Image (spheres, rainbow, N blue to C red):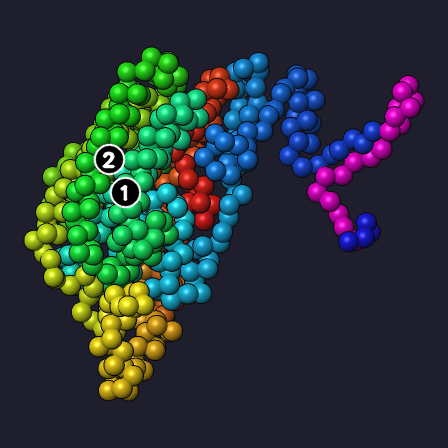
Amino acid sequence: MSASTHTPRATGHLVDDETVGLRTFEATGGDWSDIAEEAARLGEQRIVVNMGPQHPSTHGVLRLMLEIDGETVTEARAGIGYLHTGIEKNMEHRTWTQGVTFCTRMDYVAPLFQEAAYCLAVEKLLGITDDVPLRASEIRVLMMELNRISSHLVCLATGGNELGATTIMTIGFTAREEILRIFEMVTGLRMNHAYIRPGGVVQDIPPGGLDSVREALVGVRRYLTQLEDLMLGQPILKGRLQDVGVLNLAGCMALGITGPMLRSTGLPYDVRKAAPYCGYETYDFDVPVSEGADCWDRMVLRIEECYQSMRIVEQVVDRLQASAGTPVMVGDRKIAWPAQLAVGSDGMGNSLDHIREIMGTSMEALIHHFKLVTEGFRVPAGQAWQTVEHPRGELGVHLVSDGGTKPYRAHFRDPSFNNLQAVSVLCEGGQVADVVCSVASIDPVLGGVDR
């Protein structure tokens, strides 16, 4: 591009330094110009440093602009948008079923929660909430609670690694591997599953799957015990986390912060209890809380939530054992897709009986199958709001339908996005080293923030 047609964001001019015979370039424009102008106006010298967006301690492509006085952070600002994917806009151009494959990629550490929330909202619009088979809801609970454990393990593991404790990371990820093996066995994928669909789930738990879940729980419990021994009695970790990143209940309420950050202030708010979905009101579990409202309390709460999730998983495994053989997708063939899956010699696909019917017996069935897969089902005009308890807080989904086969609008209230508003409050007044602890205690996932 020629110089005459291109206007760069940052401009400048050449300056001749006659004393040393050098020519230098003074840059202007961009973020730094504003900071420099303000510093000149105030007549004080300030140091502003970038932490990220490519930094091992910012949990993804998060940019933190820190103004520091020595080692003390006097101002902290969060810059987001480096991972923007346009998922919500893309969903407007895909069928309601295809929307699952998009939203599962938002918070890639906890994909099953986005799938569940989205499908529950679609089912509200369709008016089939009560028609979803009980076994499908039980499988959803099983997968979400296993995902909650694996998500918290990532938080604990990466947080420990950022503070220099590599063993915490290796144990945390080894424990998570036990759960990812279950996901791969049930859905075929370790992440980005697109397993939960409007009307139910893609397929039932495979034979022997529940036994594998029980075995995985034994391993996860053993690794969690090791993590507790490493973390809870460690004086260095206590010194780094206690009374660091304090945010009280009033601050959380003002900023719309939910999840472990809110519960560390003593408020036992959990969507599974406040507005139950998928039958959570029938399960026996507690909502752990604490009063410290600091980084240490958030870490301890996540460990305790892992144990509570294991309680739920044990209950749902017993229920799934009793409901074996019952449907996992609604009976309405105008909505249910896929509903005729089977494992054959060439892998998983439509059952041979279904293929024989649509290819050789019923032209109507073939036409219906073709339209369902390519065009999708129609959803009555209206709007729906659905929330679930995500590992990072309250995840909300707002869907709008104009009566077509695609969403008119899909918007997600991602908890990481709201929780990141606390960066300034948590970090200002503390040390630069405390910024790492505070951001880790928020546990943001930038895929969900930027969407």
Q: Give the total of numbered labels.
A: 2
Q: Taking the image as drawn, is residue 394 in sight?
A: no
Residue 272 falls left or right of residue 293: left
The relative height of residue 353 versus residue 277 in the rendered view (above or below) is below
Marks 2,1: beta carbons within 8 A: yes
Q: Which residues are magenta?
A: 5-23
Percent x, y of residue 359: 29, 83
In this view, the residue in front, 408 or 324, is: 324
The residue under label 1 is which amino acid type? Ile
Percent x, y of residue 238: 34, 15
Residue drawn at x 35%, y 26% as measured from the top left: 168
Q: Picture quarter containing residue 32?
A: top right
The relative height of residue 418 versus residue 188 in the rendered view (above or below) is above
**Label 2: few (<14), some or many (≥20) within 10 Å?**
many
Residue drawn at x 31%, y 71% as measured from the top left: 377
**Label 1: few (<14), some or many (≥20) within 10 Å?**
many
The relative height of residue 75 versus residue 208 in the rendered view (above or below) is above
Q: Point out which mark residue 358 bears.
A: none
Percent x, y of residue 86: 49, 54
Task: Name the residue tied to disc 1.
Answer: 179
Residue drawn at x 66%, y 17% as measured from the top left: 45
The answer to if 358 sits in the magenta stretch is no
Spatial CA distance of label 2 from label 1 is: 8 Å
In this view, the residue in front, 358 or 239, is: 358
Percent x, y of residue 62: 50, 36
Secondary structure of the residue carrying numbered label 1: helix
The residue under label 2 is which amino acid type? Val
Secondary structure of the residue carrying numbered label 2: helix
Q: Taking the image as drawn, is residue 436 in sight?
A: yes
Task: Name the residue tied to disc 2.
Answer: 220
In this view, the residue in front, 337 or 298, is: 337
Q: Earlier in the sequence, mark 2 or mark 1?
A: 1
